[in-house]
Image (cartoon, rainbow, N blue to C red):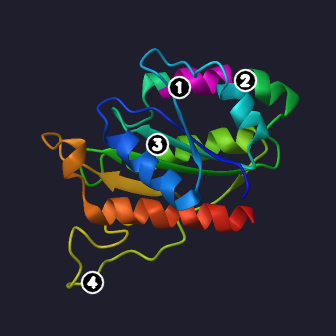
Amino acid sequence: MSDIVVVFHSGYGHTQRVAQAVAEGAEAQLLAIDADGNLPAEGWDLLAAADAIIMGSPTYMGGVSWQFKKFADASSKVWYTQGWRNKLFAGFTNSATMNGDKVATVTYLWHLAMQHGGLWAGLGILPSNDKAATRDAINYVGGYGGLLTTSPSDASPAEMSRGDLETARVFGKRVAELVK
């Protein structure tokens, strides 16, 4: 199996739950950015060895969390040497509302991957957009460029949509298949 790392920040546990589902589908290793915006000691080595990097951040005020941004800024040392050139990248985000400017966050992740000379994998799943679709359907939020999930502001991570989590697993599996 190829080495795939899911690097993410989660403020309240919802994005972590999505990251876990993505990692499950991709058979990937989780790499959490802590509350201070730092990786664990082995984090940069894991990313250097990875064939694919799947990035995740909650959408806060129309973009990535400051903790994820701190990680992204710290990756400029890797950028300078083009250490992640030609790696496969993908991205995901979660916010409390159906839109919540999630696309801006995924676009940020895409730009970061492009700056690193990476290749981008979109969601690759048609949306569930007919009258029979329910909130627990696959890709109900309707992402294309990356995985978009929603969790109400008063819901715990345990209350997240089954459809969003299954979409996350399918997305992870897609990235793993593309790496092969």
Magenta segment's dominant SS is helix
Q: CA distance from mark 1 to mark 3?
A: 11 Å
Q: Nearer the viewer, residue 159 or 100?
A: 159
- The percent coordinates of residue 129 (x first, y second) are 30, 78
Which type of secondary structure does the marked residue at label 3 adopt?
Answer: helix
Tell me, yes or no, whether the two marked residues, 1 and 4, touch with CB atoms within 8 Å: no
State which tag comes first along the sequence, 1 or 4. 1
> Would you name the residue on which mark 4 appears?
130
Q: Which residue is mark 3?
A: 105
Q: Residue 88, how many percent across, how many down?
A: 72, 53
Q: Amino acid at mark 1?
A: Lys
Q: Nearer the viewer, residue 175 or 124?
A: 175
On the question of residue 179 being in view, the answer is yes
Q: Within 10 Å of the Cα at label 3, are there few (<14), some (14-19), or many (20+) other Cα atoms?
A: many
Q: Nearer the viewer, residue 18 or 100?
A: 18
The answer for how far apart the CA atoms under marks 3 and 4 are is 26 Å
* Coordinates of residue 80 in the picture (x, y in percent): 83, 25
Q: Which residue is mark 1?
A: 69
- Residue 151 placement (x, y as % from top left): 24, 48
Query: Could you say which disc has been placed on residue 76 in the image?
Result: 2
Quadrant of the snapshot with the C terminus: bottom right
Where on the picture, by quarter, is residue 130?
bottom left
Dot 1: few (<14), some (14–19), or many (≥20) neighbours within 10 Å? some
Ranked by sequence position, the earlier of labels 3 and 4 is: 3
Question: Which of the marked residues, 1 or 2, is nearer the chain's N terminus?
Answer: 1
Give the amino acid type for the residue marked by disc 3 in the picture.
Thr
